[in-house]
Image: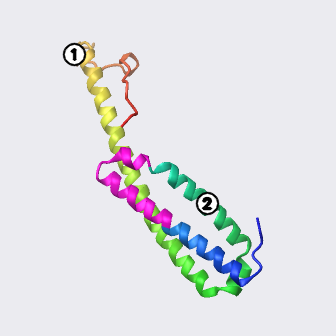
Amino acid sequence: MKAITTTAEAETALDDMTSLIEKLSGLLEEETALIKAGRVKQASEIAPTKSALAGELHASVERLRANAKFLLRAAPARCNDLQRRQEQLRAVLQWNMIVLATTHAVSEGIVRRLSGDLARKTTLQVYGASGRATPPNPRHGRPLAISRTL
């Protein structure tokens, strides 16, 4: 990791970090909008780009963290602006994660319900010793095949 020793290098490093934050934030907002609109396949196509940008952002954060003292002396106003942008990215990321988690929970619920319905249809309806209908045994259910292509 190259040390930052001049004000020009500090400005360039801060510009690069700001640019990465803006790109990743825009990409997260796009992914969130696509998922909310039900376009999961299009949203999944964003993942490789999102992952690459996150990797670049991590490397940039590590470089700035290693040179934090110099950066705070060389460009304190820019550092404050960068911190504000990071907070905005954190908010966008948090909203994105909420939407992704909700989508995951809903789709998992649908699959579980479908699996249960299929198991009930293929199980004989018999009464147990207590006189009540016995629920289907999940171990004896038929496998559920799911296509991962969207």
| Foreground of the two, 126 or 79 | 79
Position of 126 compared to 16: left or right? Answer: left
Q: Earlier in the sequence, mark 2 or mark 1?
A: 2
Report, in whole angstroms, how far the alpha carbon at label 2 lies from the one at label 1. Answer: 64 Å
Where does residue 56 sit, x and y in percent of width and height?
A: 61, 60
Position of 149 compared to 82: left or right? Answer: left
- Say which quadrant the N terminus sits in: bottom right
Where does residue 113 sit, x and y in percent of width and height?
A: 29, 32
For residue 31: magenta? Answer: yes
Mark 2 residue crowding within 10 angstroms, few (<14) / some (14–19) / many (20+):
some
Q: Which residues are magenta?
A: 23-45
Where does residue 83 sit, x and y in percent of width and height?
A: 56, 77
Residue type, label 2: Glu
Position of 131 compared to 24: left or right? Answer: left
User: Magenta part mainly helix, strand or loop?
Assistant: helix
Residue type, label 1: Gly
- Say which quadrant the C terminus sits in: top left
Is any atom of residue 94 visible in this view?
Answer: no
Labelled disc at residue 56: 2
Q: Is residue 126 above or below residue 103?
A: above
- Residue to which mark 1 is pinned: 131
| Foreground of the two, 38 or 42 | 42
Is any atom of residue 69 visible in this view?
Answer: yes
